[in-house]
Each structure stands twice: as C-alpha cells, then as structure tokens.
Amino acid sequence: MSSFLLFFFLSFFFSSLTGELTLTGRVTRIGGVKEKIIAAKRTGMKTVILPKSNQPDWEELDENIKEGINVHFVEHFSQVFEIVFPDFKQTPPNQLQLDNNL
C-alpha cells in the first residue's frame, strides 16, 4: 500500500518512484525494471527514482529504453524527498515559531 501511495504522489510531480519503503525509510529492491521504465515513458515521466540495489538492472537496459529518462538511485526515503522537493527548507525544531492563536 505504501508503495502505491508514494507512486501516485510522486507521479503528480512527473517523477516516479517504484519499490517499497520499510518503516525506517529504506527503499527496497524491485523486479521488472525494464517494464517499469517502459511504462513510465508511456505515461510521460521524465524522472524515475529507483532503488540503488537496482542500478545494475538499469545499466543492462538498451540505450533506446533509457533515452529521455533522468534516473536517480536511492537507498533511503530522505534521498527521495530531496529529489522531489529540492528547494524545501526545513526549519530546525528549536527555531519553530508557535502560533499562539490556536
């Protein structure tokens, strides 16, 4: 379920992540890389996020399949977040301003 929701969310931004996340945020290996890349291209995806452990599978693909796809390899969800939201500035907890009107 988490992989479906994450895929749907990232697809909204024209990026795709395929795989599953553990409760600690680790991105796990997937199967069917070729088929998933072809499907991503058909739906207009330009950026694909794959598990780092699938990098050899990506490198084995024919160049015509990889053409036009910007791929990122990740091991943890924090890396996914940085790719999808590159301009996000996180405020350290000790600098948060509380709204006293709540």
Image (tube, grey):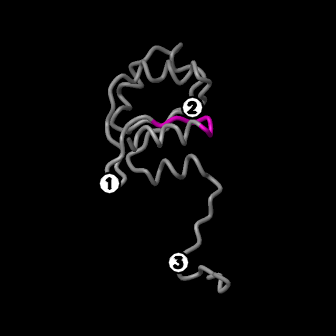
Give the position of the C terminus as an image quadrant: bottom right
Q: Quadrant of residue 27?
A: top left
Give the position of the N terminus as an image quadrant: top left
The residue identified by callout 3 is: 93
Q: Secondary structure at mark 2?
A: strand
- Label 2 or label 1, whichever lies nearer to me, is 1
Pick whichever of labels 3 and 2 is earlier in the sequence. 2
Amino acid type, residue under disc 3 in the picture: Pro
Q: Quadrant of residue 99?
A: bottom right
Tell me where residue 24 appears, x and y as whole percent. Answer: 33, 56
Q: Is residue 2 magenta?
A: no
The residue identified by callout 1 is: 23
At a point 42% along the width and 43% down the height, the residue shown is 74
- Marks 1/3: CA–CA distance: 22 Å
Q: Is 28 on the left or on the right of 38, as rendered?
A: left
Pick whichever of labels 1 and 3 is earlier in the sequence. 1
- What is the span of residues highlighted in magenta in the rendered image? 12-17
Query: Which residue ends up furthest to the right in the rendered image?
Result: 101
Q: Are marks 2 and 1 in contact (CB under 8 Å)?
A: no
At a point 51% along the width and 16% down the height, the residue shown is 65
- Label 3 or label 2, whichever lies nearer to me, is 3
Amino acid type, residue under disc 1 in the picture: Leu
